[in-house]
Amino acid sequence: MTTVSPLRLAKVFVEVSDTLVDEFDLIEFLHLLTMRAAELADANVVGLVLANQHGQLQFMAGSREEARLLELFQIQNDEGPCLDAFRTGVTVVDTDLRSAATRWPQFAPHATAAGFRYVYAFPLRLRAQVIGALNVFGVDDGRLLADDDIPIVQALADLASIAILQERFMSRADELTVQLQSALNSRVVIEQAKGAIAQSSGVTVDEAFSLIRGYARSKNLRLVDVARTIVTDLAAIPEFARPGR
Amino acid sequence: MSLPTPAAPLNDPRKVRNAGVFPGTLLFAAPSRARCAGGPKVTGSTDRWVRALGLIAEQPWPDDGSPGVRQSLSRICRAAVHALSASGVGVNVLTRDGTQGYVVASDDAAYLLAELQFTLGEGPGVDAFHTRRPVLVTDLGAEDAMARWPLWVAAMAERRICAAYAFPLQVGAARLGVMVLFCEQAGPMPGDTLDQALTFAEIVMMTVLDGEGNPDQGAQALGFDDASGYRAEVAQAQGMIMVQLGVSIGDALIRLRAHAYAESRPLHQVARDVVDRKLRFDGS
């Protein structure tokens, strides 16, 4: 295949990221992600598996129904590219299934018999942790992914990790509390910053908020980060540091 | 704000059992055999405050000089051990860059546990301080915990600690330190215990802020006021005072609270005056 056009790539990432809003459907998101990964990679089947708290992989989403079967076969037989990617954290690249019978004595013949030729597997990573894997299968002859495409699919896998971890945190009561605590405290930081700017710039707290927000937007910074800098190191922001009563 | 009578809401047998053990020998008490499975069920924010303050009031003052902030914190830590079914509770009061200020704990063993993480420079308490969010480690035997804090986890294993829960002591951008619970049994903390732990963290925070003042009175006079919901004007006033006096946000917080005490007025009213520019702290 040819390398994906930057425009197409940008559109896919914008589309996928757009669904990462406050309340999103994780399964729907992962489904969309496997569909887009399949399109970008010009692959026949893309599947995504995720480890549960015991380290066992579970099928989460696939671009087609075959993905489920391919993943389940690997999980049940405890061998295959997605398990390798998950266990080693290393991407399984460009593996010809016809010559992989030594590596995967059960999976390789099974996948070959089903008409698949090539396989890739990308770990879903978060720092040192691997939480699952994204499998890409192809039936076509020749190379499935260009070298330049491999980081693109890995980036999609990384995006999945971000989404999943967010969802996992929110599904555990104590992590929800942690998130809430953090969010609440961020709000207090913003109020403290409003007070600081109201005082230093001689404006109301509402006007101060507009100033802080405008500054954050113009510099493409997160509001809470700007607020924290205002409260801990006002001099670091010359726009706000001018003295005034 | 009126305080509901903290009339024996505590049907906790441990309280009775330990009542005669603590005085005098407290600092050398063996770690409690209690687990982190959660104490009696408590509902509602007010109940949690009543329960915490009631337990703190039952704790004797340490017999080492006049009651000060460290002695107050020691009582709070001991009360937290009971309320949260922990083996030990430690409070690290830190400087702004995260270096050790002082440590107070429920007993000697907990003191060592609390101190160790900042000596080693790793552990959930260190992370909670730097990430500004609670770090709940339900199983110190898990691989990710060992990978994250190898030295600290090894030290905890020697001391049979299987879970640790760290809470940052912070008000917005003002960071004072961390409170850490140490438990001998792994497992997630039940939601109500977690909420109770957060209440203790708030009480610890106010006690540190109020310095040598009487923490029980402080918490009763202003605690419910603070706890009754987040008040924007209090945080805004802190920011204004920070600029007026050219001090840190932490110092601004202390000044605002001290003023409310001195004037015997609710914190949010004083804050309102600051935001409305009826009251200034720089004397101009």
Image (tube, coloured by chain):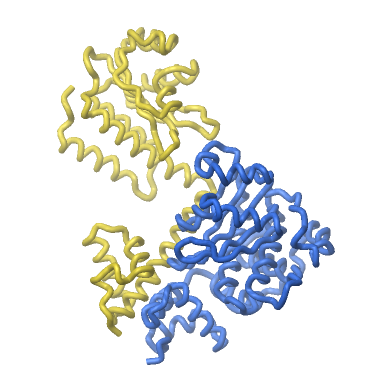
Q: Give the farthest residue toward the front.
A: B119
Q: Residue at x 65, y 78 (%)?
A: B214
- Say whether residue A36 is visible: no
Residue A211 locus on image (x, y percent):
26, 70
Q: Toward which corner of the image does residue A143 lie, by quadrant? A: top left
Q: Residue at x 36, y 11 (%)?
A: A100
Q: Residue at x 40, y 87 (%)?
A: B282
Which quarter of the image is occupied by the N terminus of chain B? bottom right
Residue B264 locus on image (x, y percent):
57, 87
Horizontal arrangement in the rendering, residue B107 relative to residue A57 (left or right)? right
Chain letter, colour yellow in render? A
- Say whether residue B62 is visible: yes
Q: Toward which corner of the image does residue A157 lie, by quadrant? A: top left
Residue B148 locus on image (x, y percent):
50, 43
User: Closest to the observer: B159 or B46?
Assistant: B159
Horizontal arrangement in the rendering, residue B109 relative to residue A99 (left or right)? right
A90 is higher (above) or lower (below) than B153: above
Colour assigned to chain B in the rendering is: blue
User: Closest to the observer: A210 or B158?
Assistant: B158
A86 is higher (above) or lower (below) than B7: above
Which quarter of the image is occupied by the C terminus of chain B? bottom left
A227 is higher (above) or lower (below) than B252: above
